[in-house]
Amino acid sequence: MKPDEVPIIKGQFTAKGSTNHFLVQIPANILSDIQNLEVDEFSEIAKSVIESWERAHEEWEVAKCVPIRRFLEAQRKFNPLIPDQYDDFIAEILKAGERSNNREVKDAVLRLIKSSYYRTLNSSDVMPLIKNAVEMAVADNDQDFFKRLGRELEKRALPYRPPKEQTPLELLLTAHWITDGDIGLHFCCFSDQALADFLHHVAPEASPTFDAVRQTRKRLKLKQTRRRLIKVVKQVGKSLILG
């Protein structure tokens, strides 16, 4: 090796979800810079990845759980056929009686039927609550309840819209933003253009244009290294040369 030549480190890269392996070559000095990022800087980047995963998980949990949780809360509070775990049978009977006479069931039913989740009124799950509310409204001569019930049923039900699944590009960025792969290649060290060029070769199915990479990174709030260590990606034969 000539004195002015920089040693080249070779390794394999496989994108998450892919079985295709790519030979990657990167100058040793750049790889050393990547592997020796300051602890504070690396911690901030790692935190941004964790927070991105947590936000995605939380969105799904909220979307899945809120309608179901509201229904289960209403069942436990108002449905006399759903017993609590009482050892005392008499206490259980009394608790069921309290549920069957709880006037709040009327408001609970009016809240539930706003959602498309509960518009199947003859459902074996929802019907006992509705029946209880209607019987109570009749007993109370609560004409306002029936007016409100009619108005809610005339409205279009609020649709249940869970969050969209993560796109292939989102999955790739979060999976490889920091990584312990064969060559220790962190996507956080790429410029947006270099990362788009790199993904164009290793994961073209993710449609990794420059704009897509940049917008996805920003949307996920993934932090890059303060100094972009990889700015150029080019293909030479079967190898991807990073610089």
Image (spheres, rainbow, N blue to C red):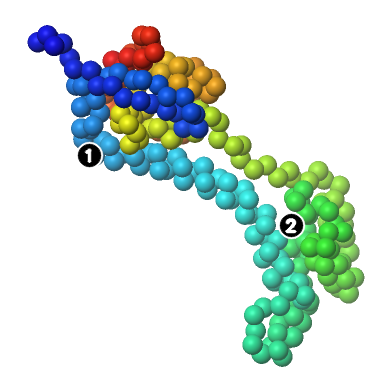
Q: Is 110 or 166 nearer to us in this picture?
A: 166
Residue designated by label 1:
39
Give the image quarter of residue 167: top right
**Residue type, numbered disc 2:** Arg
Q: Is residue 59 above or below residue 224?
A: below
Q: Position of residue 155 (x, y in %)?
A: 82, 45
> Does any portion of residue 133 appear in the rendered image?
no
Q: Position of residue 140 (x, y in %)?
A: 86, 73
In the image as oriented, which residue stretches furthest toward the left?
3
Tag 1 and tag 2, C-beta contact below 8 Å = no
Q: What count of labels does the image hold?
A: 2
**Left or right of residue 72: residue 148:** right
Q: CA distance from mark 1 to mark 2?
A: 50 Å
Instruction: Tell me: 180 left or right of 103.
Output: left
Q: 243 and 164: which one is in front?
A: 243
**Mark 2 = which residue?**
111
Query: Residue at left 77%, top 75%?
Result: 81
